Amino acid sequence: MVCMSNLVDVLVIGGGPAGLAAAIAARQKGFRVTVADGAAPPIDKTCGEGMMPESLAALKTLGVSIAPHEGFRFRGIRFVQHSSVGLSVPSRVFCEMNPACAADPPPQTAEVSSDFPQGFGIGLRRPLLHEKLVASAEQCGVQLLWRSPVTSMDAHGATVNGRFIPARWIVGADGQGSRVRKWACLQEARSSAQRLANRRHYRVTPWSDFMEIYWGRQVQAYVTPIAAEELCVVLMGERMADIAFDRALEDLPQLRERLRGAELARHDRGAVIVSKSLQNVQRANVALIGDASGSVDVITGEGLRLAFRQAFALADAMAAGDLTSYQREHRALEKRPMTMARLMLLLGRHPSLRNRILNSFTAHPELFAKFLAFHVGESSPAQFLSAGAALGWRLLAA
C-alpha cells in the first residue's frame, strides 16, 4: 500500500540542467516538486558550454540571470576549414608537387561567419550554469535531495536513498544512460548514431566574438569563449584517435597556431555523444526529458535549448493532467535539431562535399546566414528548404 502522507506532485530523477529546468517549470505551475540525484552539485558534463539566444531567453523565464562578467558573449557562428582538408589525397599531393599549384596556391582557409538574427549567445562554464539553476530551484521552493541515489521505481513513486517517495508524476532526467527510461520500458529508438567528444579548457584571451567550428578531415573542433581569459575547445570525431588533442591539432593548423603556447586551464574530459530519437518519451504518469528522452549531436548549445523547451512543454502537460500532449510537443521540438544533426554528421563524414559547401557559403554568405537562422529558430522549414535549394543550385553550377 502506498503511503499518501508524503506524496509529492512531481518527482524528478536527475538533477542536471534538464532536471532542474523541469522542476522549476513545474514549480511555477504550483506543483510540489522534489529532485533526487546520487551526485552533488555542481554537476559537470562534456559539452561546448555555449548557449544560443533562445537558451538565454529560456533561462530568464526559469529565474536565472547571467551577469556580463560571468561569461563571454558571442555574436554568431563561424566555420573555418583549411583549403587542403576537402581535397582527396591525390589532389593534395598534386598541389604540393605541381609548380603551377605552388605558383598560384589556393586560399589557405575557407571561412564564413554570420551574426545571430537576434540577440547574442553566451559561453559559460557548465558548473556555474548548474549552480545558478540550483539556486533558482531552491528559491522557488523545489526540494533538492543530493547524494540520494534512486534504486527502483514503479507507477506510484521511487525508492530514494532507501526511502520510498510516492509521486503523482515521475520525470526521468537521468541522462543518456537513463535507468528511468529502462524502468518505464521506453528504450525503443526511432534512430540512433554516436560520436566521441573530448573537451579542454585553455587559459587564453579569446581572439573572436564568434563561436567557431574548425573542420579537419576526421575531426571538428568547437571553440567557445567562456570568459575574458578562457576558451572551451571540444573535439568531435568517430574514433578515439581522431579526438586526441595532439593529433587533432595537427589536422587543424589554424586552431593549432591560435593555441600555441596557451596554458591548459583544465584537464581533458571525454564522452560519448549520441544522437537518438525515441519512439515514445512518456508512458502513463512517467515522462523523460533532456538526454534521457533522446539527444542531439549538433552545434554547441542545442541540447540545453531543447531541454529547456521540453521543460516548459512538460509542465504544461502536467498542468493539463495528460502527458500525451508532451509526447506530441517533444516530437515537434526535436525535428529542427535532428535535421541539423544529420547535416553536421554528413559534413563531418564527407570532406569533399563539405569543401564545396563551405566554398559556396564563403562566396554567398547570405546562404550561411539562412542556415544559421534556421538553427536558432528564426526561420521556417520552408525558408530552410529554399536556402537548401539555392545551395544545391550553387553546387551544381560549380
Image: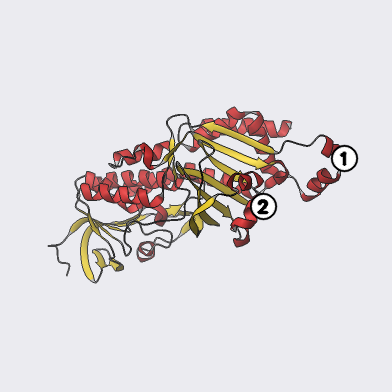
Element assignment for label 2 = helix
Percent of width and height locating residue 27: 22, 47
Vertical placement of 165 versus 205: above or below? Answer: below
Specify whether 154 is left or right of 201. Answer: left
Q: Which mark is residue 250?
A: 2
Residue at the image position 67 percent from the left and 48 percent from the top:
350
Vertical placement of 270 versus 129: above or below? Answer: below
The crowding category of the residue bearing disc 1, from other C-alpha atoms within 10 Å (few below 14, some 14 to 19, many at least 20), is few
Specify whether 178 is left or right of 207. Answer: left
Percent of width and height locating residue 56: 37, 39
Residue at the image position 53 percent from the left and 52 percent from the top:
263
Kind of residue at disc 2? Glu
Element assignment for label 1 = helix
Q: Quadrant of the C terminus?
A: top right
Question: Residue 371 appears in which quarter of the rendering?
Answer: top right
Residue at the image position 27 percent from the left and 41 percent from the top:
63
Front residue of this view, candidates 250 and 158:
250
Q: CA distance from mark 2 to mark 1?
A: 25 Å
Question: Residue 293 appears in which quarter of the rendering?
Answer: bottom left
Percent of width and height locating residue 44: 40, 56
Kind of residue at disc 1? Pro
Q: Quadrant of the N terminus?
A: bottom left
- Provide the residue designation for mark 1: 99
Residue at the image position 30 percent from the left and 39 percent from the top:
61
